[in-house]
């Protein structure tokens, strides 16, 4: 038995297949009639005229094989058109009579019939106060009751809906304290067992004799017995006994699905009062439903096709407005943040390039060109440079600073830790020796007298390059003429700190650097207002760090390997997810493992401990000792993830890798193999789940941060990707930027086109008004910059 929607699907499919088929079947008419014979007549009777139209359609192909080839061609091309018409007639509701009316939309819910003040409070807890809020409270799913099966016809493994009477109810508890609610449901044809797990409150809802609809997967539990794990259910009464698709709303705040649905039923026709801000020609071009019809349809779906089309419209809106707001804000910002162009002379930078012991990679050259273009431009540069650990971001940043100095300005680099700042300083002093430049290092721990002298040099302009930690954004640091600020390991800083740094001068271009790449999908959309440059190529000769999964029970062999590595002059990191023992989590921690390792297996070696709860100076000292090889093993937490160079560190052991994101694991892995020596990364895991193994396997076999970030995005969603939340990514109701990336790219294209045509959105006042309200924060955030 099939329902009308399945009939259209199957018949469409038949004609698609027909086109490709050779030899052609002997009679189309017979074939499609066979499909139509399966139709559930009980459902069909609810659609007046449907039987007649279907038979007309079938008859169109009755003598098909006898027709001339021209007529046959014509009839075949008619098929999809006719089916589309049938779909529009039966699988979609009649379009609403639209008339925008804000008064109705703003009506408080408590004034709606059936919603007293008490229930209005519950709706308020869901964030729903007005009719409009309610209209945009979309179902989380649907309960398709068009295809109710008699119990005797159920085939195990299917997801089906049954309707029957409750014969008996029992609630039990298993030994592992699981609550199981069991109901025997009967209809005219048989008995089915329904089960719910761990929802004890459902008990009170049911009584014997009630009529219940239940949807879920059925499995066979014996020769004749079958059991359904219930996903959706509803007690049946006069309001909800028709065969149709029912929306299912999230059950929260003490409101049941049926209660929410009853109120929405009463209000959904008010969707006709919505104002559609999308330009009519865009709606037509994209073949979208009207906003009013789409909103109404999500609450009153006629078919899966209908749900899909309504969803498409809402998703397009969400993504389109977001993109429009993003690019609009970017354009406003660019127009506002003007500066004098910095001339690019390339004297100092060429000098440095000549004396480098290596050749720049093509990726480095390209990014350097971007920087030069940014310096020349008459708007302030805000460039994000992303590049894997070891891809050589520092040298590119330094070249940018040299251009800035040539143009008559100072440049600075801010790093998150004093060790990193010191390493940058030492490296640059070495590279720039004899070029007549003054480089200064400023840390919080720099002694007071020296600090005073450095401050004077910065203020007088004697300092050309200032390298430091947060110390350089303190109030009392005044630059003579800061022209370029570089922020290394950007994710360790907040937006505020960048803002503070920019305000240290009149014309400060900024470059932020990160080793955590932003997946392409996001960089084009979510981060569309940032300029992003990628160093997507490693200097030649880098060997990838060999990565292996080690099951808990093979740690002995791992420790033997570590010992060999130490005696070969290597140094080792062992990273744990926790600083100290935790009662709540069954995880190993750095502090106890440090003691255990030092006192037992590695008692003949020097073990150090480093973690985030230590004071900054203490951390620095320990790190320095490790660099000076006073320790063979450094037991640590993820505090070591940020770019410090310890050339003789060759092994990274990570315990409980399942606790870390791939981007973080990749950062940790990047700490080793930074020299000629081969690097190893061992992931010690006791989590035997398939998903964990798959993820770690992927990590072990991929060495590019770009690949890893795409994988993370795909598996864990955009919320988990570094920086997305900070960047003001809204949470959409229906759209998912990963699954709906086609719509996203399309929406972006349309948004950019509109802005090119009308940069102030003067020709699109409705659109402008819409984004100014809906994306107020995004616009404001950008105003400050
Ligand atoms: P990251 O991008 O992780 O900050 P660094 O800038 O610290 O990387 O560079 C890592 C190492 O690679 C440094 O020792 C640097 O001198 C070296 N390096 C940078 N560019 C090149 C190149 N083109 N060829 C060879 N080595 C390079
Ligand atoms: Mg770096």
Image: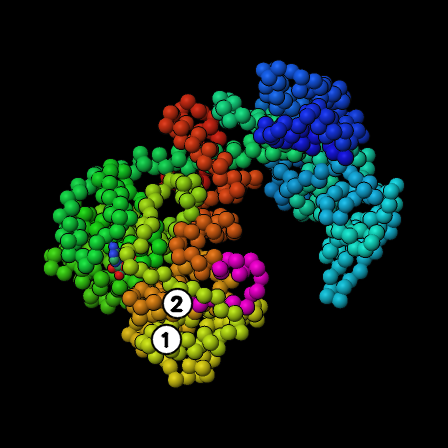
Which residue is disc 2 drawn over?
A: 680
Corner quadrant of residue 765:
top left
At 52% across and 58% down in the image, what residue appears?
A: 694
Q: Which residues are magenta?
A: 680-697
At 49% across and 37% down in the image, what residue appears?
A: 742
Q: Going by the image, does 675 lie left or right of 598?
A: left
Quadrant where the C terminus is found in the figure:
top left
Label 2 SS? strand
User: What percent of the width, then of the height, locates residue 356?
Assistant: 18, 57
Front one among 171 and 2: 2
Front one among 24 and 367: 24
User: What percent of the width, then of the height, locates residue 541?
Assistant: 29, 59
Residue 41 counted in the magenta span: no
Front one among 367 and 542: 542
What's the mark number on residue 266? none
Q: How would you rate the neighbour count of disc 2 (Cα within 10 Å): few for under 14, some for 14-19, many for 20 or more? A: some
Contact? badges 2 and 1 (CB < 8 Å): yes
Q: Is residue 714 something one can see in this rendering? A: yes
At 38% across and 78% down in the image, what residue appears?
A: 564
Front one among 538 and 445: 538
Which residue is disc 1 drawn over?
A: 565
User: What percent of the width, then of the height, locates residue 393?
Assistant: 29, 54
Q: How would you rate the neighbour count of disc 1 (Cα within 10 Å): few for under 14, some for 14-19, many for 20 or more? A: some
């Amino acid at each position: 038995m099939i329902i009308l929607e399945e009939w259209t699907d199957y018949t469409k499919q038949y004609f698609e297949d027909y086109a490709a088929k050779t030899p052609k079947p002997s009679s189309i008419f017979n074939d499609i009639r066979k499909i139509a014979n399966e139709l559930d007549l009980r459902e069909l009777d609810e659609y007046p005229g449907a039987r007649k139209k279907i038979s007309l359609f079938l008859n169109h192909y009755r003598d098909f094989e006898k027709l001339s080839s021209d007529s046959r061609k014509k009839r075949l091309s008619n098929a999809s058109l006719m089916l589309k018409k049938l779909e529009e007639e039966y699988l979609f509701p009649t379009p609403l009579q639209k008339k925008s009316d804000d008064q109705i939309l703003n009506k408080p819910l408590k004034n709606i019939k059936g919603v007293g003040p008490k229930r209005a409070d519950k709706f308020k807890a869901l964030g729903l106060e007005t009719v409009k809020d309610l209209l945009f409270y979309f179902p989380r799913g649907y309960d398709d009751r068009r295809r109710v099966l008699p119990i005797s016809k159920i085939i195990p493994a299917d997801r089906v809906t049954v309707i029957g009477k409750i014969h008996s109810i029992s609630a039990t508890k298993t030994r592992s304290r699981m609550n199981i609610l069991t109901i025997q449901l009967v209809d005219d044809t048989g008995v089915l067992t329904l089960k719910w797990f761990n929802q004890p409150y459902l008990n009170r809802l049911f009584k014997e004799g009630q009529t219940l609809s239940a949807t879920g997967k059925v499995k066979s539990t014996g020769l004749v017995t079958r059991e359904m794990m219930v996903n959706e259910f509803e007690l049946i009464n006069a309001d909800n006994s028709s065969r149709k698709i029912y929306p299912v709303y999230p059950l929260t705040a003490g409101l049941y699905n049926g209660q929410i649905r009853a109120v929405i039923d009463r209000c959904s026709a008010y969707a006709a009062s919505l104002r559609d801000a999308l330009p009519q020609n865009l709606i037509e071009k994209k073949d979208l439903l009207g906003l009013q019809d789409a909103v109404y349809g999500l609450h009153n779906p006629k078919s899966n096709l209908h749900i899909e089309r309504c969803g498409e419209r809402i998703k397009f809106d969400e993504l389109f407005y977001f993109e429009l707001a993003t690019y609009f804000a970017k354009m406003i910002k660019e127009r506002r943040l003007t500066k004098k162009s910095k001339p690019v002379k390339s004297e100092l930078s060429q000098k440095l390039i000549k004396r480098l012991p290596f050749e720049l990679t093509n990726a480095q050259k390209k990014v350097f060109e971007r920087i030069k273009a940014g310096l020349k431009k008459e708007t302030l540069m805000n460039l994000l440079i992303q590049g894997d650990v070891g891809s050589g971001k520092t040298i590119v940043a330094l070249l940018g600073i040299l251009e800035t100095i040539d143009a008559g300005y100072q440049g600075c680099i801010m790093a998150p830790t004093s060790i990193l700042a010191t390493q940058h300083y030492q490296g640059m002093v070495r590279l720039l020796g004899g070029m007549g430049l003054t480089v200064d290092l400023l840390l919080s721990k720099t002694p007071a007298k020296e600090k005073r002298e450095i401050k004077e040099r910065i203020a007088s302009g004697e300092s050309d390059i200032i390298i430091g930690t947060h110390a350089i954004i303190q109030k009392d640091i005044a630059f003579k003429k800061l022209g370029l600020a570089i922020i290394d390991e950007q994710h360790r800083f907040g937006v505020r700190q960048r803002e503070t740094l920019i305000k240290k001068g009149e014309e400060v271009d900024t470059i932020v650097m990160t080793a955590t790449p932003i997946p392409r999908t996001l960089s084009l959309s979510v981060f569309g207002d940032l300029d992003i440059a990628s160093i997507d190529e490693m200097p030649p000769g880098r060997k990838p760090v060999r990565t292996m999964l080690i099951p808990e029970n093979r740690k002995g062999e791992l420790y033997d390997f570590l010992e060999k590595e130490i005696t070969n002059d290597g140094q080792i990191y062992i990273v744990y997810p926790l600083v100290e023992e935790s009662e709540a989590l069954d995880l190993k921690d750095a502090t106890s493992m440090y003691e255990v390792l030092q006192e037992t297996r590695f008692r003949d070696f020097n073990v150090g401990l480093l973690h985030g709860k230590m004071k900054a100076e203490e951390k620095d000292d320990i790190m320095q000792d490790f660099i000076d090889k006073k320790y063979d093993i450094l037991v640590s937490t993820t505090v070591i993830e940020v770019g410090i160079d310890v050339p003789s560190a060759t092994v990274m052991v990570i315990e409980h890798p399942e606790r870390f994101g791939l981007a973080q694991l990749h950062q940790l892995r990047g700490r080793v193999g930074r020299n000629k020596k081969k690097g190893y990364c061992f992931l010690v895991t006791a989590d035997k789940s398939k998903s964990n193994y798959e993820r770690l396997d992927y990590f072990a076999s991929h060495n590019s941060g770009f690949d890893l970030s795409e994988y993370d995005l795909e598996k864990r969603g955009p919320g988990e990707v570094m920086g997305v939340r900070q960047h003001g990514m809204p949470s959409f109701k229906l759209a998912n930027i990963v699954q709906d990336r086609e719509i996203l790219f399309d929406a972006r294209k349309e948004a950019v086109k509109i802005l090119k045509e009308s940069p102030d959105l003067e020709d699109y006042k409705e659109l402008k008004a819409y984004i100014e309200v809906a994306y107020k924060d995004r616009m404001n955030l950008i105003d400050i910059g």
